[in-house]
Image (cartoon, coloured by chain):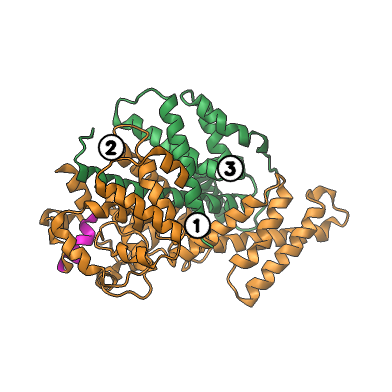
Amino acid sequence: MDLTGEFGARSGGGGMCRESTGLESLHLGDEFRPLVTLPPENAGGFTALLELPPTQAVELLHFTDSSSSQAAVTGIGGDIAPPLHSFGTLTFPSNPVLMERAARFSVIATEQQNGNVSGETTTSSSANPDRVKTEPADADSSQRLVSDQAAENQSPCPSQNNRSGKRKEFEKKARREKINARMKLLQELVPGCDKIQGTALVLDEIINHVQSLQRQVEMLSMRLAAVNPRIDFNLDTILASENGSLMDGSFNGTSMQLAWPHQVMETEQSYHHRQLQPPPPQQWTFDGLNQPVWEREEDQAHGNDHNSLMASSENLMVGSENLHPNQVKMEL
Amino acid sequence: MNTYNMVKQEFIKKWITTLHMLDSSVDHPTNVTERKNAIKLSSDLAIAAARSGATVWSRAIISRTGNKTTNKPVARRILKKARNRMKNRCTTVRRNGSLKAKIRMRKRTELLKSLVPGGESINNKDYLIRETLDYIVYLRAQVDVMRSVAAVDLVIGDLQNVPRNK
């Protein structure tokens, strides 16, 4: 079946690593193995990722997401870790933490947006101390940034300066420091950038990153279009229950939870076995359908999230295809 | 405090809205490419709307959509919020250094400007980098969400054996 094939192809890489752990029941055939090729290990950073065809790159991104975020892992994670060492150059370093910081940066800038430039820059630079690495030099520079920003605000246009010489130099220095601080943050955000010296190469990596993300969006929207006969696909259904579990970062894991009741019968046994292993809070590894997501549901402290999850799961178990729109709207 | 999750959540809400809007305002698309374009457009509008016009790239996406013919009502609704926020930033930064390095830097900067929506109008390198940073965060959120939706969609559809167009 074509869709099984596509699904298998995307999880073929996972199958390769985990065949020994009982994924045979998912019918991952040998024909999928050649689809997964390891990237050249000496190629650094994102450029290696980009050499691969998009589907494989996405798979690798799955792996890197999972491998980088599983700190102390047992069971499944242990199986993943050895084969993925060669992917080391492609990992997103400490993905959730970075995205958290970067997202906070954008959100803070949003919240305090007063529609004027100086407001924005003040806010973002005052938020800088949180984001820049906690080293004395950086802390000093960021504090200087704040004071510099305050100084800049007083006369935004250089042409208005009275003591033009000193102030221009002052501002130049401040600007350069700001740029450097942000470049550092960008460096952290874009994988593979920490080792690079020089702004130009960092810019290269950033450009590659943006390009690859945009390409992924293209590919994903093509995939979504291929799967759904209409534009307005049942996003509500899927996301109503996922919405609840977004808070604990297990966003993608919940999608597995939705799929859970529909698992093929013979695989349920192996899945139930895996429940006994404690699930690390992890990024999405779609090929790992054997993630013990049920346990996470028990561990959840959020009461209402739990209820909404259970409700939607039960709905799916009963076999109704779509949640009632009213219910969906409430949950949203 | 899961800010990234909030970003994703915001994106999801807006995406659902834009999908509905597009679905109602556009004729039923005939082939995969049109659907793909519609989905991509809806998700781009969604990240721009999630950013609610506070950044240059988000406003650029919205206004870029507004210029195209197919989605006037959709774009207009979102544009209303963002219309008053366009700003010109006219400060420039001069770099010292060798000529070749300058040229290389300029090339890269221009490339980055072409990638980030609305980047061409940003002259200050500092702002460009900030915009890029913001844009990357939202792009990542977009990719994460779309990826998981695609996965779920595939599995659910597969197991329900719904016939699909390819």
Report, in whole angstroms, how far the alpha carbon at label 2 lies from the one at label 3: 30 Å
Magenta segment's dominant SS is helix
Where is residue A248 drawn, in percent x and y? Answer: 44, 62
Label 2 to label 1, Cα distance in Å? 28 Å
Task: Name the kind of residue labelled 3 in the image.
Answer: Ser
Q: Which quarter of the figure has residue A72?
A: bottom left
- The chain containing the residue under callout 2 comes to A
Residue A293 seen in this snapshot = yes
- Mark 1: secondary structure: helix
Q: In the image, is residue A71 part of the stretch drawn in magenta?
A: no
Q: Measured from the top left, where is residue A25 in percent x and y?
A: 13, 59
Q: Residue visible at 82% across and 54% down? A: A154
Q: Which residues are magenta?
A: A11-20
- Find out whether residue A13 is within the magenta segment: yes
Chain depicted in green: B
In this orientation, which residue lies closer to the viewer: A259 or A100?
A: A259
At numbered mark 3, what does the secondary structure look like: helix, strand or loop?
loop
Chain identifier of the residue bearing label 3 in the image: B
Chain of the residue on which disc 1 is drawn: B
Q: What's under tag 1, amino acid-wise?
A: Tyr
In the rendered picture, chain A carries what hue?
Answer: orange
The quarter in which the N terminus of chain A is drawn is: top left
Circle 2: residue type? Ala
Residue in view at x 60 percent, y 67 percent: A132
Residue in the picture at 61% in, 40% down: B121
The residue that disc 1 covers is: B4
The numbered mark, 3 or 1, whose residue comes first in the sequence reads 1
Total marks shown come to 3
Where residue A226 is drawn, which disc sits there? 2
Q: Which residue is mark 3?
A: B52
Q: Is residue B23 above or below residue A296?
A: above
